[in-house]
Amino acid sequence: MANLASKLHAQPWWLLLVSSLLVSNIHHRVNAEPQVPCYFIFGDSLSDSGNNNDLTTTAKVNYSPYGIDFPEGPTGRFCNGRTMQDIIVQLLGFQEFIPPFATARGQEILKGVNYASGSAGILNESGQQLGENVNMNMQLSNHQTVTARITEMLGKCSASKLLRKCIYAVQIGSNDYINNYFIPEVYNSSRLFTPQQYAAYLIQQYSQQIETLYNDGARMLALFGIGAIGCTPNAMAIYGTDGSTCVEKMNSAAQLFNERLISLVDELNSNFTDAKFTYLNPSGISTTNSLGFTVANASCCDIGSNGELCVPGSEPCGDRSRYVFWDAFHPSDAWNEIIAAEAYATEFSGQAYPFNIKKMAQLQSNNVADGDICEIGENHCNM
């Protein structure tokens, strides 16, 4: 979403064709067999599906008009409909959305769990000025609870093999900027670190967290970069654009993080040869005009006095397919459909490196050696 006006045609012409085809076929994929057996989601409000509903925080949206276009109505998703991760799950052929950790029970955890939490960050303190959240370290702890349950259900061997075939989507880091570095009146991180130093510090912490996931059995990890945080309606309202399309200092800081994340993916793929890591950062900018998105700098719903979320019970815009943003921070369902399609199938290395979600799903069958079989309940096997 960075620099929508200036970079609208910066990507290859075929990307528009791929996105259009995927959007038109997306609903037909939900009846297919899942391309992977399970999908685990870690992240923040871009992926949260209800984990914040019972927390003491202003970062929760279990009220209308959120969910106005979602079959279940308001669920805690920071959107009018589906998140990007919801749509990727559909593209992978799952019949149902991945349940949030807060309500996931019984056999449904075998298909995956969504641990994402609005306002959460890589750093424990990020977003805490808004109230409680489930930061990345806590999400990893919750995942260990889930993997222990799966092991109880299946036995150590079968559980390990299942977890090796799952995709682990991690989309976090925005709040370490939006709700930490760029609010110096609350946090001192911008006084302690230059943008370059802060990106390095975040990646250092993030690297340890990803290695924890690996040590807990993850072998297929999709690491999402930080989007154009300087292009949100909130950022432009607070900081102004000084003649630019977006708040460049915010986008530049995010880019520093993304560059280091790409290097981390290379390092992880080199160090852990039995696993697959990929960097994803879909932008959708090549399709904005062609698919009818005419409002890229304003929210679809009425924003409350905090300048962030929709006013409870308010009436949103009528044609939500024209809006990139649903509220002052979060994309609309229509925009999520575009960027999910790109994350799933784009061949553009700037958005998927070294491969996309579809390719990762195809690779998952290589993670378990041929003929390596164990019975349910067996506690030991050769991996």
Image (tube, rainbow, N blue to C red):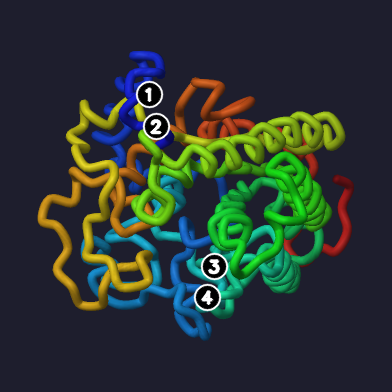
Residue labelled with disc 2 = 3
Residue 170 is at least partly visible in this image: yes
Q: Determine if residue 150 is in view.
A: no
Report crowding for label 3: few under 14, some 14 to 19, many 20 or more residues within 10 A (C-alpha). many
**SS at circle 1:** loop
Q: Image quadrant of residue 237?
A: bottom left
Question: Residue 52 in the image: x percent, y percent?
Answer: 50, 76
For the residue pair 363 and 4, the one nearer the viewer reads as 4
Q: Is residue 19 above or below residue 181?
A: above
Query: Tag 2 or tag 3, which sits nearer the N-term?
Result: 2
Q: Which residue is mark 3?
A: 117
Q: Secondary structure at mark 4?
A: helix
Residue at screen point 40% across, 18% down: 11
Residue 323 vs residue 130, the one in the foreground = 130
Q: Front-most of 336 and 5?
A: 5
Q: Which residue is mark 1?
A: 7
Which numbered disc flags the more N-terminal residue, 1 or 3? 1
Of mark 4 and mark 1, the one earlier in the sequence is: 1
42 up-or-down from 7: above or below: below
Nearer the N terminus, badge 2 or badge 4?
Answer: 2
Mark 1: give few (<14), some (14-19) or many (20+) Cα within 10 Å.
few
Q: Which residue is mark 4?
A: 130
Judged by depth in the image, the label closer to the viewer, 4 or 3, is 4
Give me the C-alpha separation between circle 3 and circle 2. Answer: 27 Å
Instruction: Specify the quadrant that holds the N terminus.
Output: top left
Q: Position of residue 137 (x, y in %)?
A: 73, 65
